[in-house]
Image (tube, rainbow, N blue to C red):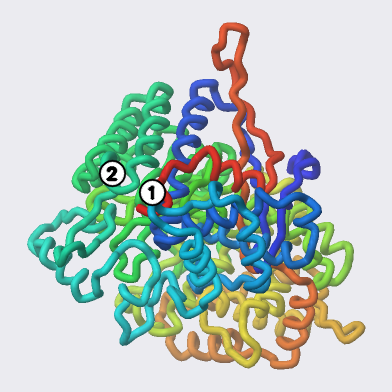
Amino acid sequence: MQNTTNTFDYHVDKFADIEILRYRVTGFEALSLQQKQLIYHLSEAAQEGRDILFDQHYEHNLCIRRTLEAIYETHNETEKNVEEFNAFEIYLKRVWFSNGIHHHYSTDKLEITCSKEYFTSLLKKVPVSLLPLEKNETIDSFYTKIITLIYNPEIDKKRVNLADNQDLITSSANHFYKNVTQQEAEDFYNGLQDSSDLQPISYGLNSCLVKENGIIKEKTWKLNGMYTAAIEKIIYHLSNAMAFAENSKQKLIIEKLIAFYQTGNLQTFDEYSILWVKDTSSEIDFLNGFIETYGDPLGRKGSWEAIVNFINKEATQRTQTISNHAQWFEKHSPVNEKFKKTSVVGVSAKVITNAMLGGDSYPATPIGINLPNSNWIREVHGSKSVTIDNMMEAYHHAASGNGFNEEFMWSQHECELTEKYGYITDKLHTDLHECVGHGSGKMLDGVSPEALKAYGATIEETRADLFGLYFIADPMMVEIGLLPNMDAYKAEYYRFMLNGLMTQLVRIKLGDTIEESHMRNRQLIANWVFEKGQKQKCIEKRVQNNKTYIIIHDYVALRTLFGELLAEIQRIKSEGDYTAAKYLVEKYAIQIDYSLHKEILERYTALDIAPYKGFVNPTYEQVYNEYGEVIDIVPHYTESYTEQMLRYSKTKSYLPTYN
Ligand code: ZN
């Protein structure tokens, strides 16, 4: 609804299977100076653990990264301006993106596409003093080590191996364990755990498990322990941040986190997590520590991660408004009265604006956070669940320039509608789905919640989606200020039908069927509504120049059909009508028209859209007055991907090459 977006360039870089975007810290200007300073110091702390993550991912990562960077920096522009150097540069960019030499998503070893001979010639041009040699390491053995690690695909080929019937620890390249087998690691932790402890600490979360001289022990990541040089810096910035805490609770949270970094005591970490989950009043929030455990095949070791954010009041207000109208929605929904709840409570979600990403959240980032991970803390103290608004905004704007809409939408009219309203209506549909859709309706007495068995999940998602689709076109949306006018919802109707009938299939392999329940639900709705709507001539499929398009002629009639299907789906759910659920899902949700699928994949492939996205961070400048006092902090959005990565490697890099 604001027109400032067109001056902001979201696109930063594109290479291999990656696109790098920029996110905007909307609303930062409106924060108080104290809040800005808090964010500033937390952001500094968020950048200091990058080396930790590189080393956690693989013990040779820092050595390889520093070598590649030395090559990059010792070659001039003329030398860089050849095709083989470009292949080398892409490899370096991929290593930065993955925080190591294994793909961030598949965890397979990255392939370098310049020849070994060429790489060797680049490497040998670097002055020896600039290379990260170990004590007593000869330059020849260093060359051999680097070239072998990068070029031999069989050595340490997967960072996280989850394949059955293999030793998951020795076959995984990560640096969470060293010289121990899976059996030894499992025995070690089974020995520590007491099964009668109802509030167990997260054993193993903050350490590398090693065997030295036959003894298995943990090397803890803490001050004066493993990674101390980086942790010292993190503590320094957290201490600075503490002076600008918004309230005493928040100050205590930062204090606890510092104490955890100082001692490595996991009991302290649990105390910190409880304080953190209970703080719902501070406007600024952050994560900094060893959090997610996906990088460890045994699910114990926390990858270092940091996020700094603040509440997006406007967007949070939006989910609050929806939630406040839960009863109104229930009353006006098109389902049979006997399936309605007499009193409904909506849920409201906190929406945040991200200000800084670090470690495992950078450059690839989550769009939502749901923490802490400790099961007992979640049960006893609850969890925090938030969505990150400005990331979704960046994704949306980046997508509007990639040719996707122009390729698949029927005319300029639909493209413009999407450009204008697509972002707000997409979010609004999601909010309606989550805040009121799932919570609406009731089961009849005696009906088991499991009555729909394997079809249950798809039917439930269908119900929530239809609830959102029906109400997004209600004049009430304009009345309560969630949409600007009665044209806006059409953007979501068109997007939804196009996606459900065609474009979501780009994520499915040719010849496969649809399995995931959200994808099934979308196709179920789109196919059912299309079948009825085609007869009424309110929607059609038209082929032009061998390309299939969807044309919507009557949006109001479409809404009536969404309402009809919602009534039927609610009946199926309320009565536990397994036969009807099975019929709808089997008939509309699973099968794919082979030739249409083939056409869509060909059109999509031709667009050359990168499947993975990541972000560069803004930089924050402290503005001083004549007395040397900070009077403002200003975000800048000018740094390139390579500039940012090289800057972090120079100014936020304190760890030794091997840890
Ligand atoms: Zn859902």
Which percent across, then down, holds residue 127? Answer: 60, 50
> Earlier along the polypeptide chain: callout 2 or callout 1?
2
Nearer mark to the viewer, of 2 and 1: 2
Q: In the visual, does 333 lie left or right of 503?
A: left
Q: Is residue 251 left or right of residue 433?
A: left
Residue drawn where x is 15% and y is 67% of the image: 214
Q: Nearer the viewer, residue 339 or 116?
A: 116
Regarding residue 113, the answer to whether it shows in the image is no
Amino acid under label 1? Answer: Lys
- Judged from the image, the secondary structure of the residue bearing numbered disc 1 is strand
Q: Is the N terminus in the top left, top right, bottom left or bottom right quadrant?
A: top right
Q: Is residue 346 left or right of residue 469?
A: left
Displayed quadrant of residue 53: bottom left
Question: Eyeballing the image, is 157 above or below 657?
Answer: below
Going by the numbered disc 2, the residue's amino acid type is Lys
Q: Kindly report the distance in space between the C-alpha atoms of the residues bearing marks 2 and 1.
A: 26 Å
- Check disc 2 and report the residue beneath it: 222
Residue 85: percent from left, percent from top: 72, 62
Crowding near the residue tagged with mark 2, few <14, some 14–19, many ≥20 C-alpha atoms within 10 Å = many
Q: Is residue 398 left or right of residue 612?
A: right
Question: Counting other residues with Cα less than 10 Å from the Cα at mark 1, is it few (<14), some (14-19), or many (20 or more)?
Answer: some
Residue 11, horizontal then vertical, whole percent: 73, 52
Nearer-the-camera pick, 313 or 524: 313
Per the image, label 2 sits on a secondary structure element best described as loop
Q: In the figure, residue 522 lies in which quadrant?
A: bottom right
Report the disc number at residue 537.
Answer: none
Q: Can you name the residue that lies furthest to the right here?
A: 545
Q: Is the residue 40 above or below the residue 530 in the image?
A: above
426 or 259, nearer to the observer: 259
Query: What x and y, as percent, mark residue 55?
Result: 41, 56
> Mark on residue 384?
1
The residue closer to the viewer here, 586 or 83, is 83
